């Protein structure tokens, strides 16, 4: 059995508690509080203690999906990405960049938020980018 | 937050919590407040509901839904009348005090009591506790912001803190508790229609040129649409396509019927998520993302602390980290993005966001992270803001009059509905309802009603009731509790089968911040069985 502990940050509320993922044979097995962390000092709430449960939920999406004849069907990444690229490009050409909007997320990382707004501004060519801070 | 979480426990002599159900929504911040109380700090709680923290408070009041400005103005009236304010701090560091004072002079305890329902003696005691125990920290959450007067409410909180010299001091400050793990980061990274990273305006020629040069494209200097305006633009067929990443607006946005109607008009909807959310079910293409623990990256918490979240396991199935998905889409549209790691992207961010993130590297972040502003490699980070001077120079007092919420109780809709979270669940429930140990805590939605009202409409606990607003109606079971005041109802936001946004209004929002008024709406409640 291979066991390691990987430090991370809880992904629920904005408090930002430090957690340790217990990883057994390459899979996250449970969540522990980081004892030395300046925010939570070795404590977690009920959501934090159960953080790994949604990550390993059987309900997770397992791969990209594309709607065909009204139904969502499994697709390869190339098919899904190319279809999205084609549709955005056509709508941008026909109606202009401001006919497209992007919602970024308070759940994805800084790096991903940065790329998403860079994509909106530099590739689509609009400032129609917002997220759920208001909601 | 202007200040840091640890300061509440160690440095604050008074803590004023308004519009935050802290023990349910931010439990590890609540534990600091409880510890502070043990250490002798005074605790003041103002909330329309009897929240758990209220039971520990030196003074707790239940003001009427949406009456925050009046309550805060009333406290400030008492503080100025008793000369408990800090004239030197105001003279040295603030501006526009006289116009502000002229308005405050009108908010006598008797008048404020009529608006808020809080007894004059309690308003006086709140003012005394907050102003006579320095430093005092003010904490708020969506109970302050999700109103048609959200900006006014926040400015009133700022007025109170400045009046008592509580901004720029350890243990004081104005501390909004962020509801999502990376709301702060999403804003810092330019996930807003008017700014690039670090709040550099798109309309500022210098900032626009800087980013245009860095990205090799001429960028638009016209601010874009907010989420609230985007939905309107979809309805008017001005927006034809949407790319929604890690959000579930079908449950989180106001007025479900209006939004659902609008989303059907889209020519193309791309959703990127870890679950098949209500919104993803309407998508034309779905990109499946890796979750927390499956990719590297950083999050910035409510106290501006940027921290690393490391990869612990491979992404499940055929999912990819969001940064790789966005890079692939961008490259497919002819703008190559070839990042080999999240760290490479972080280094690009810090190079363009000099004043706040400029001094950060993955190595420096370590385990504990760094609090911005951290402008250079030797900077230790900043536990609290506005130390010597305010970011804008002088702290500006705003003269703010109380305004009624958009909807008041009336003959047809005699109850006021407020919405929020409960302890075991999170936001639209996509993450917590699939978690076995959280699901067992609360399986489905409910509406809280006061025992007196329950008796009037002749219902027992768990009876089904029908809620009707000007937008729509829904069935839900009743929970009878004195946690809500007579005339008020509370509905948690987590449950897709009881979507609160069937009832909430998309027309009632703050004119400046465009935040919807989720905290007050007029409804009717009827029992469903004889």
Image (cartoon, rainbow, N blue to C red):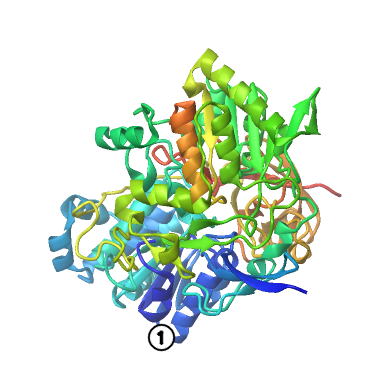
The quarter holding residue B513 reads top left
Identify which residue is drawn at 62% across, 22% down.
A86
The quarter holding residue A47 reads bottom right
Left or right side of A37 for B464: right
Identify which residue is drawn at 38% across, 66% down.
B138
Q: Can you give x and y, in whole percent of width and height, for residue B506 in the image? A: 55, 35
Quick check: can you spot residue A104? yes
Who is closer to the viewer here, B380 or B351? B351
Q: Which residue in the rendered view is the most extreme toward the bottom?
A: B39
Q: Can you give x and y, in whole percent of width and height, for residue B525 in the image? A: 70, 47
Quick check: can you spot residue B402? no
Left or right side of A98 for B359: left
Above or below B491: residue B129? below
Identify which residue is drawn at 31% across, 73% down.
B170
Residue at mark 1: B40
Above or below A34: residue B359? above
Identify which residue is drawn at 48% across, 54% down.
B343
Who is closer to the viewer here, B132 or B205? B205
Q: Can you give x and y, in whole percent of width and height, for residue B458 in the image? A: 77, 55
For disc 1, the chain is B
Q: Can you give x and y, in whole percent of width and height, for residue B455 in the image? A: 73, 59
């Amino acid at each position: 059995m291979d066991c390691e502990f990987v430090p991370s940050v809880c992904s629920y509320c904005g408090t930002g508690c430090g957690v340790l993922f217990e990883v057994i044979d390459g899979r996250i097995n449970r969540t522990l509080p980081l004892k030395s962390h300046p925010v939570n000092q070795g404590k977690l709430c009920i959501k934090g203690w159960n953080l790994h449960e949604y990550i390993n939920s059987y309900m997770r999406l397992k791969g990209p999906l594309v709607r065909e004849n009204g139904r969502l069907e499994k697709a390869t990444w190339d098919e899904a990405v190319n279809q999205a690229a084609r549709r955005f490009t056509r709508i941008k050409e026909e109606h202009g960049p401001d006919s497209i909007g992007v919602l970024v997320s308070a759940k994805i990382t800084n790096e991903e938020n940065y790329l998403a707004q860079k994509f909106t501004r530099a590739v689509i060519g609009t400032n129609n980018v917002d997220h759920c801070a208001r909601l | 937050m202007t200040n840091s979480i640890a300061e509440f426990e160690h440095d604050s002599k008074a803590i004023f919590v308004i519009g935050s159900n802290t023990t349910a929504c931010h439990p590890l911040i609540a534990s600091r407040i409880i510890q502070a109380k043990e250490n002798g700090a005074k605790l003041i709680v103002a909330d329309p509901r009897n929240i758990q923290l209220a039971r520990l408070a030196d003074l707790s009041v239940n003001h009427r839904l949406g009456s925050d400005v009046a309550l805060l103005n009333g406290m400030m009236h008492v503080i100025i009348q008793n000369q408990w304010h800090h004239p030197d701090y105001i003279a040295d560091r603030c501006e526009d005090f006289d116009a502000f004072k002229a308005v405050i002079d009108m908010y006598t305890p008797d008048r404020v009591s009529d608006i808020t329902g809080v007894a004059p003696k309690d308003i006086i005691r709140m003012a005394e506790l907050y102003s006579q125990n320095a430093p005092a920290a003010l904490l708020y959450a969506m109970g302050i912001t999700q109103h048609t007067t959200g900006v006014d409410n926040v400015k009133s909180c700022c007025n109170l803190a400045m009046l008592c010299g509580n901004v720029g001091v350890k243990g004081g400050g104005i501390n909004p508790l962020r509801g999502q793990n990376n709301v702060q980061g999403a804003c810092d990274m330019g996930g807003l229609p008017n700014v690039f990273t670090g709040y550099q305006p798109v309309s500022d020629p210098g900032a626009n040129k800087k980013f245009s040069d860095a990205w090799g494209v001429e960028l638009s200097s016209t601010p874009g649409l907010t989420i609230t305006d985007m939905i309107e633009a979809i309805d008017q067929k001005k927006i034809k396509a949407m790319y929604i990443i890690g959000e579930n607006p079908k449950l989180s946005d106001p007025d479900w019927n209006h939004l659902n109607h609008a989303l059907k008009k889209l020519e193309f909807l791309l959703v990127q998520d870890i679950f098949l959310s209500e919104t993803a079910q309407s998508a034309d293409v779905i990109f499946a993302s890796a979750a927390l623990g499956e990719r590297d990256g950083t999050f910035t918490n409510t106290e501006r602390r940027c921290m690393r979240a490391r990869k612990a396991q491979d992404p499940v199935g055929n999912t990819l980290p969001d940064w790789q998905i966005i890079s692939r889409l961008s490259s497919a549209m002819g703008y190559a993005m070839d990042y080999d790691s999240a760290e490479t992207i972080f280094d690009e961010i810090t190079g363009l966001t000099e004043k706040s993130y400029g001094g950060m590297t993955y190595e420096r972040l370590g385990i504990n992270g760094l609090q911005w502003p951290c402008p250079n490699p030797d900077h230790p980070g900043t536990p609290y803001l506005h130390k010597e001077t305010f970011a804008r120079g002088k702290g500006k007092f705003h003269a703010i009059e109380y305004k009624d919420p958009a909807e008041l109780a009336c003959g047809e809709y005699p109850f006021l509905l407020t919405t929020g979270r409960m302890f075991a669940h999170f936001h639209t429930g996509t993450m917590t309802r699939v978690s076995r140990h959280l699901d067992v805590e609360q399986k489905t939605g409910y509406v809280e009603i006061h025992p007196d009202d329950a008796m009037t409409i002749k219902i027992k606990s768990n009876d089904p009731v029908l809620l009707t607003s000007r937008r729509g109606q829904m069935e839900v079971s009743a929970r009878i509790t004195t946690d809500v005041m007579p005339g008020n109802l509370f509905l948690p936001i987590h449950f897709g089968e009881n979507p609160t946004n069937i009832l909430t209004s998309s027309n009632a929002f703050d004119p400046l911040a465009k935040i919807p008024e989720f905290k007050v709406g007029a409804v009717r409640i009827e029992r469903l069985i004889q």
